[in-house]
Image (cartoon, coloured by chain):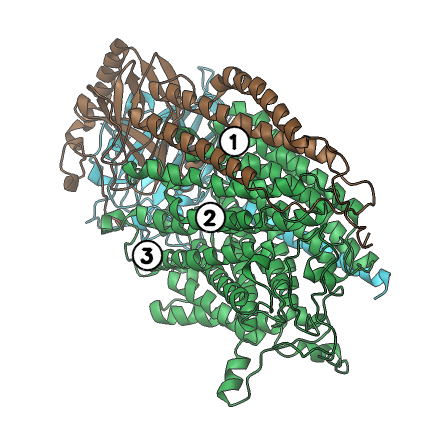
Chain colours: A brown, B green, C cyan
Amino acid sequence: MAAEPTAAPATPSDSTNHGLRVVVAWIVLSAIATPLVAVFVGHLVPPGNGSTQGTEQVFDNTWMLSVVTPVICLLAVFFVYGLRSFHAADGAILDGPPLRNDSRIQILWIVGTSVTVLFLAGFGTYELLQNGAGGGQGPDPIAVPAGSKLQVQVIGQQWQFTYRYPALHGLESNQLVLPENTDVELHVTSLDVIHSFWAYELGVKADANPGVDNIAFVKTKGPETFHVRCAELCGLWHGYMYNNGRVVSPSQFRSWATQQEKLYASIAPFMNKSAADGGAPYARTYLPLPSERAG
Amino acid sequence: MTAVAAPPPRPLWRRLLGFNLLTAVLLGVGGWYVGWFGAHAISAASIGYFADTDYNELSVYLAYIGGVVGFLVGLGFLNYPLARMRGYPPSLREKETHGWTRYFSLCTDHKVVGIQYLWGIGLFFFIGGLNAMLIRTELLRPNHQVFPAGTYLTIVGMHGTMMMGMMTSGILGPFANYLVPIMIGARRMAFPRIEALTFWLLMAAGAILTTTIFFGGFPTGWTGYAPLSNEANPGMDNYIIFFALVGISMTLLGLNMIATILTMRAPGLSWTRLPIFVWGVLSTAVLMVLAAPVLIAALGMETLDRTAQTTFFVAAGGGSSYLYQNLFWVFGHPEVYILALPGFAIVLELLPVFSRKPLWGYRLAVGGLLGVSLLSWFVWQHHLFVSGINGDLRPFYMLSTELISIPTGFTFLCGMMTIWRGNIRFTVPMLFCLAWFFNFLIGGLSGVFLSDVPSDVTTHGSFFSMAHFHYTIMGGLVFTFFAAIYYWVPKMTGWELNERLGKVHFWTMFVFFNSTFFPLFIAGFEGQPRRVVTYSAHLQFLNDWVSVSAFLLGISMLVFLFNLVWSLAFVKKPAEANPWSSRSIEFQLPSPVPVHNFDRIPVFSSDPYGYGEGPVPTWVAPAGAPAGRE
Amino acid sequence: MRPGVKLLLVAAALTAAGVVIGFYVSNLTSLAGSPTYTPPVANASSGHPVVNLQIETVAAVGPKLSPNPDWVSYLIKNGGQWQRKTVWDLPAHATVHVTIYNFDGASGLRNPYLARPQGMVGNRILVDGKPTEAIDPNDASHTFAVPALGLILAIPGVPDDAKNPCGYAPCPMANDHRTIKFTFHTTTPGHYRWQCFVPCAAGWIDGFGGPMQTIGYMDGFLNVKA
């Protein structure tokens, strides 16, 4: 093993243009693979078609897959070709050609990666600014859909989400029910530690921080059931902090609201008391006393 | 320099007395109780710790501080300063003798510290891995089964914290400490005692984190987000002390590396002749020195929140939960590059040896390492894309995060062009390096999805991001860690590792690593969040597949362990001085490297990558030349 | 060193590692593992199984029942004894009659929404014999909530000026207490977690540390079995 290497051959023993072969194979493979990935894999990428934001995320993910595919193809072609062609014979320790640099390849590579990266960043920014892409934007959102919106507050606490509807006289429920084809403005806040509201099928995720009004927008589509999970570790029952939500027709939404208002009529007087009296008038954020102690 | 004559052997019991690990553990336990009772004397009359409803956090902190101080005193870290105060002359070296006992005491020989690091970190790496097995056992079924919900979170937190804290020094600890002085032609690190201190601090930290299970564990995962950490059990204090000690150790390790590389290079070793591994160590060390203090500051605030009821992170008291998130990720994102960069460097260091070609594009490779190092400071808020902090800064962080793929691409280009038209030998270290390309490509490309806000909305906090960082850290760091082990351990110990077992280890690890983590991308896309004990029933097949693969991955690690024990303890086949026919300077020295490295300080005339450019230069100055500076 | 000695050393190291790992894993499995209570099941004429649960909530669990004597806790009556068991085996599709004796004072709800009893038969509870559809959020001492069953109810606390409060468990019925009765139905088999939503863990920030995050005190499971 440790034998001194024999002297390097002065020139590569073969004059094959390996570079050209790799480039041609890469271009052919990419040209085949990229459309296939975009068409057949793209639509499988979550979160699916549950909301306008979800659809746009799928579109965005499909584009990124399409950009990523040629990169994978390049590496695949390079390594399959390179490792097959350039391996040493068993036991032989022969020096290769002492190639130390080629500024043309460097420049080509730097320009290629830069253009790809800038395109991805620009594309992502454009998608983000369209309508916020379903992400929590904080109290002063920059990407706000035009038109009227249904406000719903999401309150996280250890360990449940509840939902308040200022449009329904501050009704609070543990069910998230939304009317179809409606722009919804979600105000996410927390009563204790950090939670994260993740409505998977709607493509919405927004952290719930105590004392913070984190706004996210979503435009619902047709009727469906969606899953809500907490996506930020929040303690013992974090793994059990989930429930289902529904998107329903406007008439079903009205009858649901009537039924809920009836159910919660008995605590309505308390809800609208001042916070000092134990009530909770509709507010964007809540700041419970930090070290409230039991009696 | 002549070899030190071995002192006459003393009986074993006599060797157990004195400043060594045994004394350190005893004094550590003693110091723990001193701190414990001391704190109770200050803040509560009761010594029955659990009798207090308000946990006496102060006593936990003081107990562990007392324990660490006792541990260090027992190792003998105070001997030298005290001797100096009493007027004894300065000395640079301690315990640089032969014999196995030096591995269990304070030793300032950088090679001994390197080997101590290798075994010490390896031990905690296996504890972290055991926790991973427990996680996968729990996730065999969609509902809870083996571990209660709270314990599951502790296991997840222990796994993440142990791996992140310990493996941060996974390459700088063993390999940089061992190799950097040799590669730059020095006989020691700039601060040998500090070098030993970084190792023993890390061991104390690891022991402290492991004992968290006796204090109720901690529910926060490795991120330790406040205010959840404010209300957690005293096991949280173990997490805080662990990470603070790791932070101190990292800072000192980084400072030591920077000082050594800047000031102790041998004549002729200009910046363009420095081995790329040393460049990687330097760029990592800079990150360590600048990032870790931010973490220590955040943990200090958290300590005050927990002991003195301040409200740094409590919104109702005027603090902010964002403050901790910001501070943590200002540390945390450079931290993940601290994990990744040494891997880049090892790949670039090993590829020329096994392709027998010079490193292609040396300056570009250096630029890539430094570029990643620089850019990693401008990306931390991509962890907070959906948190509602600075919604209008998201396009900037999206851009800065994606820009990192440009310098990372330099590493790929330089590595690929080094292989190109070479004479590749598929040795075990080379296989691990080639696997790095595959793993880091997948890890990096999935990172592009996470850096893109619209995509991040779905993937953030899901198993997708978990799979992503396992591909970059396990696929990037741990694979190169093993490459380094197979490449350098024969040099460090003087004994060969079994190559056949090494190949079995590589192929099982590579296959089951991918079989474990690739399906988790799908699980994340399907909506499975991280760190949950329950998941949708339809994901059970995927999770079972992953669990079985993870167990097989664990067995692959046992193959490695067997190889290590078998080769180093039983077969003991002496390694040749230069088993890989490398041109690097450490392989021009005997195996194992003598205590004082070089008889003469070498004079460098080229970089170590001149394959195909003539015979290996005679770096080691001929005998009879004047001895170099100490 | 002779190979035999080496082998012996390796075997000893392996055994030691096995013991340490075993200790570690068994420590983790038992850390918060809670003993299970299986109540007697009666079969009513309707064909549905019927279960009676008697529960007590106490401000301090006392040194007899826990290493953390000051912790707030739920207790369950098993054969005349109050026990600290919060994992309960229940039959599926059963009618469960629950009586809760609360010996703790009020600390108030953080989310007043929880003051509305819901998910039990008739969406109302009996507080000291009186049918109640809402309690004052300020009066809440604890809640008993099984989110997956939609079962939520707040338990009013003993007034602050009570003459004969209970120090620590087990609390005799002679001490001041509130009695809450309700009936609910279990559904399909599964593990249903239950918890308290009142920030009642004294001394922790947000009142949600210690007993609130430890199974066996203010959290538990309903193991509904077929």
Q: Is residue A290 visible?
A: yes
Question: Given contact means CB atoms under 8 Å apart, are the residues at marks 3 and 2 in contact?
Answer: no
Image quarter of residue C103: top left
Image quarter of residue B62: bottom left
Mark 3 and mark 2: Cα distance apart in space: 37 Å
Question: Whole-percent x and y of residue C13?
Answer: 72, 58
First reached walking from the N terminus: tag 3 or tag 1: 1
**Residue with the mark numbered 2:** B371
Give the amino acid at mark 3. Asp
Who is closer to the viewer here, B168 or B589? B589
Mark 1 and mark 2: Cα distance apart in space: 45 Å
Same subunit under labels 3 and 1? yes
Give the amino acid at mark 1. Asn
Query: Which quadrant holds the N terminus of chain C?
Result: bottom right
Is disc 2 surrounded by few (<14), some (14 to 19) or many (20+) residues within 10 Å? some
Helix, strand or loop at label 3? It is helix
**Residue with the mark numbered 3:** B305
Same subunit under labels 1 and 2? yes
Question: Given contact means CB atoms under 8 Å apart, are the residues at marks 1 and 2 in contact?
Answer: no
- Tell us which disc is closer to us: 3 or 1: 3
Apparent side of residue B38 relative to residue B624 in the rendered image (left or right): left
